[in-house]
Image (tube, grey):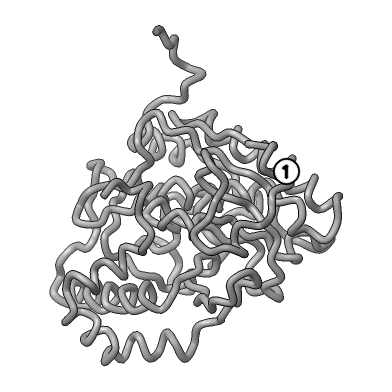
Amino acid sequence: MHASERTTTLAAQAFHDTPELREQARSSDTFAELVDGAQRVTLDGDGRVLFLVEGDLLYDEDELQLYALQREAAQRARLAGVATAVDLDPSASLIAMAPGGRIVRWKPGLVLRYCVLRRSFPTQQQYEVVRTNLAAATEAWQGVCGIEFEHAAAHDDAPDPSLEPGEIGPGLVFTVRYIDAEGLFIAAAFFPTYPPARRRVFIDPSYFAPQLRFDRIGVLRHELGHVLGFRHEHIRSGAPPVCPDESTFDIANLTAYDPQSVMHYFCGGVGSPDLAITALDRVGAQKVYGLPFSSLLLVQ
């Protein structure tokens, strides 16, 4: 089945194909710890409860179970001195998802069309801020690698598709909407492997707070990095030990560790509240998506 036609998550598919994995996950101490410690977010449209993982990613129970198994596998590998990441450069900023050793990316030629759901925002001003900042963030990524975003503004006034799980406007890849997560995150995103119904970028009220310490466009640059398939930079071995501990299973190191990467949290005295795309981020993104289209003479 083509990726765009999937209606189930990869985690659910993995458990369906290998039922013993689910039993292993349910008895996992790591899964129990994650469930006990995880913050929960309820989607107001369909009432589903998702678990907040890694600060700005939302997982359902299947995904959290698989994540627990991956963390355990990575821990066992570290104890045995086995690498859990593929180095794509001899120097091996940016980390890509790489299940089974294959890097995840959107298919060539796909335009990442999105809408900003106006009705989900409490005020017109908040909607306009997100719309404007998202345009700047998409332009930043388009300026460093061969990817194309498009704001399908005609869909902005459509009913929120989260009210009808599984539905999304025709021709759209993802939606952007407001959700009151009570400050559990500033914004949250998804990976390319998520099924269409889960491809949403969420904006919390804290994004609009006057005292926000991060650049607002930078926050969206970071979240769009996840949309493109990039993991958090601070999970690298060179990051300060106080940075959040996350699974390093099925990742590919695209460049050397970059403490200023757009994908790095502000922790341990490194990272940047600007969340700007660095020179190393550019190198890593181009390894996956190629040169920006603006630097090419495209001939039909």
Between residues 34 and 127, which one lies in front from this camera angle?
127
At horizontal 59% and vertical 42% (from top left) the residue drawn is 114
Q: Is residue 227 left or right of residue 130?
A: left
Between residues 98 and 198, which one lies in front from this camera angle?
198
Residue 158 lies, in percent from the top left, at: 69, 49
Residue 139 lies, in percent from the top left, at: 60, 32
Q: Amino acid at mark 1?
A: Arg
At horizontal 50% and vertical 83% (from top left) the residue drawn is 38
At horizontal 29% and vertical 56% (from top left) the residue drawn is 251
Residue 57 lies, in percent from the top left, at: 50, 65
Q: Is residue 95 placed above or below 19 in the rendered structure?
A: above
Q: Is residue 114 left or right of residue 257?
A: right
The C terminus - image quarter: top left
Residue under label 1: 131
Q: Is residue 62 placed above or below 111 in the rendered structure?
A: below
Residue 129 lies, in percent from the top left, at: 78, 47
At horizontal 45% and vertical 67% (from top left) the residue drawn is 240
Circle 1 SS class: helix
The residue carrying pointer 1 sits among few (fewer than 14), some (14 to 19) or many (20 or more) residues within 10 Å by Cα, namely some
Number of residue marks: 1
Q: Is residue 294 left or right of residue 23?
A: right
